[in-house]
Image (cartoon, helix red, strand yellow):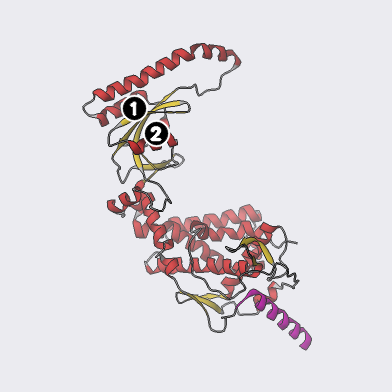
Amino acid sequence: MIRNKKLIAVLAAALALVMALSGCSTTTVEAYTDTADTTATTTESLDFEAAYNYYDPDTVIFYVDGAGVTWQELFYEIMYYTAYVEYQEGSEITSWSDVCSLFTDSDGNYYTYGAVVLQNAITVLEQYHIVYDHLAAEGVTLGKDALDSIEALREQVIEENFDGDEDAFYEYLNSMYCTEELWNWFNEVDAMYAYDGFDTLYGEFGSDLSDEDVMAYAAGDEDGTWTQYVQIKQIYIYTEEEAEETEETAEAAEDTATEEASAESGTVDAILAALDAAEDVDAAFDELYSQYNENADLDPYEGGWCIYEGDTDDEIYQAALELGEYEYTVVSIDGADVIVMSVPIDPDAGVYYDSSTGTMYTLRYYAAWQNYSDLINGDDGWIASAEAEWADGFDSFSLSTIFAEAAVAVETEDTTE
């Protein structure tokens, strides 16, 4: 039986930071066989209880920038990634030396289960310790919003996965060799990263980030991770009826289609003529917007919508790139003619409006988050600059060795008894 499928849903709650830092570089503590012999087939008795008991939970196995990582922490992650790999492959791991079908190196060689599970476990712990230690050094502490989010997550996990039975949740953590303290610590680091770390270093919604840094972000990433931002004002004139037509109205709609198209064309021409005649094009555009625009989703973006590639129809984005400041053009997209005018980028222009909360996320906010990500995950960031090393006596650490030695210890103990 594949062990603990429920683990994926429950304990993954404590691994959100890793997803946020996906694709990051990391230091590496290596002491395992990188790739598997695909011709080898072995069967071992993977006694997790014996392996866990082989060391004291507080035994330091390796260090990250001088901070010790204990056996308790590492074994928890070993359990998690064992269950994850088994779930993905649909079969139980019976030997750490067997082939894992999920990962290969650049030459197409498969990694062993032991290599996959151990390296993922180590990488997660490296990231969490690095982020926690650096944020703590910056004076970051958990505020009310962060603490509330942690408690809400705990309640959600217990309610959704254990039918509200708190004791069952604790029993499950114990079965996974995970303490409540450790589970909470992962969630606390996530909250530090998502809430107080960002606010402490960059201000609420990135308010402390300079205009210069915001505009550098708006220029786009030279590696193409994100494209250049443009700020635009738009007036939508729909060219097709949005509502569904019934059989009774279909014929009438067809009869009036030509007349409506002519009227819509006349509206666009009138808007362009008014802009052409205006002394203050920006003010005139705002007035014409209030009079003619048919896309209410644009209303929250006062001063124009700041976009990059993918935020809106590509025809609109590409046209905006070609426009100078306060230049305008008509872009025809499916179902609408859109009068588009380019305006100077405002560092506090809106990029995304969350209608459910009434919150506008600005260019400054996104620029600050990119700087935050680079600080932690960039080529010269905290993670890339960290150093990891095995504790004394663990230089040859591998899952195959530890589980084998633990099994022998159990057999010896049984014999002596």
* Quarter of the picture holding the C terminus: bottom right
> The residue tagged with tag 1: helix, strand or loop?
helix
Question: x, y percentage for residue 324?
Answer: 29, 36
The answer to whether residue 304 is above or below residue 246 is below
Query: What kind of secondary structure does the magenta stretch mostly adopt?
Result: helix
What span is in magenta? 397-416
Residue identifier under label 2: 298
Question: x, y percentage for residue 414?
Answer: 77, 84
| Residue drawn at 49 percent across, 12 percent down | 256
Are the two marked residues, 2 and 1, in contact with CB atoms closer than 8 angstroms?
yes
In terms of depth relative to the viewer, which is nearer, 402 or 53?
402
Q: Residue 403 is drawn in which quadrant? A: bottom right
Question: x, y percentage for residue 170?
Answer: 63, 64
> Callout 1 environment at 10 Å: few (<14), some (14 to 19), or many (20+)?
many
Note whether residue 5 is visible. Answer: no
| Residue drawn at 66 percent across, 67 percent down | 113
Residue identifier under label 1: 289
